[in-house]
Image (cartoon, rainbow, N blue to C red):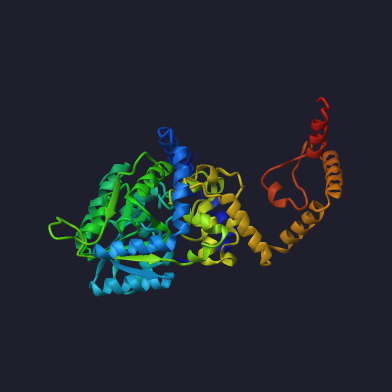
Amino acid sequence: MDITAHAFKANAKAALGDAQLQRALSGLPGGLVAQRTAARAKLPEFEALRDIGRDIKNHTLANLDLYLEAWETKARAAGAHVHWAPTAADARQIILDICQAANARIVTKGKSMISEEVGLNAHLQAAGMEVVETDLGEYLVQIRKETPSHIIAPAIHLTQDQVEQDFRRLHTHLPRDRVLSEAPQLVDEARQILRQKFISADVGITGANFLIAETGSSVIVTNEGNGDLTQSLAKTHIVIASIEKVVPTLEDVSTLIRLLARSATQEISTYTTFSTGPRRPGDTDGPENYHVVILDNGRTALLGTPFREALRCIRCGACMNHCPVYGAVGGHAYGFVYPGPIGAVINPAIIGLKEAAHLPNASTFCGRCESVCPMKIPLPKLMRDWRTLEFADGGGTLAARAGLKLWAYFARRPRVYHMAARLGITALGLAGRSRGAFRWLPLAGAWTRHRDMPAPQGQTFQQLWAEHKAGVPR
């Protein structure tokens, strides 16, 4: 994919002016947010589970090498071929080699953000293979030649009218007078199109929500049957997963799945599928060959840093569903695979801080992302840490750096700071007394371009606090 994280501001401006996108995003509060709230309310122990889930992931990350080795031992014993990919390029080449060894012409895929991260589809297509996304949302963005805009709802940026137009444009062999005015009709048509692809596929590729060290299994959590069909009908099944997906035991997975489903949209996902090796004698279905590609791609470098906490992420999407910035501009504005608050934290580690520097700054710091994260990842803190690193590396505009230095000067001198604040508030209060607000202010043009700046009323906070402590009545 083309990485445009460096152009976040321009991307966001275009998104705000896209009426179709805004109509699609307007459904977030009544959709994914409301569904999570309802599912969460039915689990009284949800907060206790968050603590348990966080501790499971922290323990695993602290012993990641041991659990990865334990998982590999069990997976190989079950007949899996395990491949280690330090970089995205390594992962692409490993999977291409497996597909070519299988003489693959058609490759079906379940939803996998890791495959998006490494740019897998384009690599296989360049080698002459037909790659078919079988998750409905992924299929929709694929036929539009777009990328996913959300990690659990890839086509959330589309309206139903757009989907109908795309189906009529692409599925020209079907009757022109067919009715596609309801969502079930669109789903049924996609099912008809994809059914033959499942049957014809030589290789099926899925991601993995979890890898279980105790059994050597991979787990996918889906709401469509496409994941199961992708991995069971093709002769070769390839799993691509990143190193932090491993967890110690089946019991640990059961805890995390309870958190994952409710944090996303519902009490439990429709399908939770465990895969352990290829088809065994007596099995009624399953692949003849089972490969697992484990990707690093910068994650190991995070383990010894404060950003290690981001590796607890279980890809539920709750942070972006509740983020006012994501809700205003959607996922494509972020310019890389992972949007929203979690993207603002992990994208700089994958594509570099210079490319992704705008993303940690694309936050109101309201804290909603951290409050709903099932793994209690301190996303606002980690975004601040990226901002600190950017500043230390000489990043940011000259105006921003000058402003921070000026603020630092006053912050180190409390008496001067308080005096300047009193003088500034008094002057602004007098200047804005007639209207009560400013339509324009120097150094605040971006704010006042879209809203008025209220004029200060009365005393500073420090003055009010001093009077409060002194018991001055109001």
Q: Quadrant of residue 384?
A: bottom right
Task: Identify the image quadrant of the N terminus.
Answer: bottom left
Task: Identify the image quadrant of the C terminus.
Answer: top right
Give how far across and how far down residue 82 sits, in percent: 32, 67
| Residue 177 visible from this viewpoint | no
Q: Quadrant of residue 101?
A: bottom left
Which residue is nearer to you in this view: 358 or 93?
A: 93
Give how far across and how far down residue 180 sits, in percent: 30, 45
The residue at the point 34 percent across, 41 percent down is: 268
Seen in the image, is 98 located left or right of residue 91?
left
Seen in the image, is 369 located left or right of residue 64?
right
Seen in the image, is 100 located left or right of residue 368?
left
Which residue is nearer to you in this view: 80 or 380?
A: 80
Identify the residue at the far left of this view: 282
Which residue is nearer to you in this view: 272 or 120?
A: 272
Give how far across and how far down residue 427 sits, in percent: 86, 43
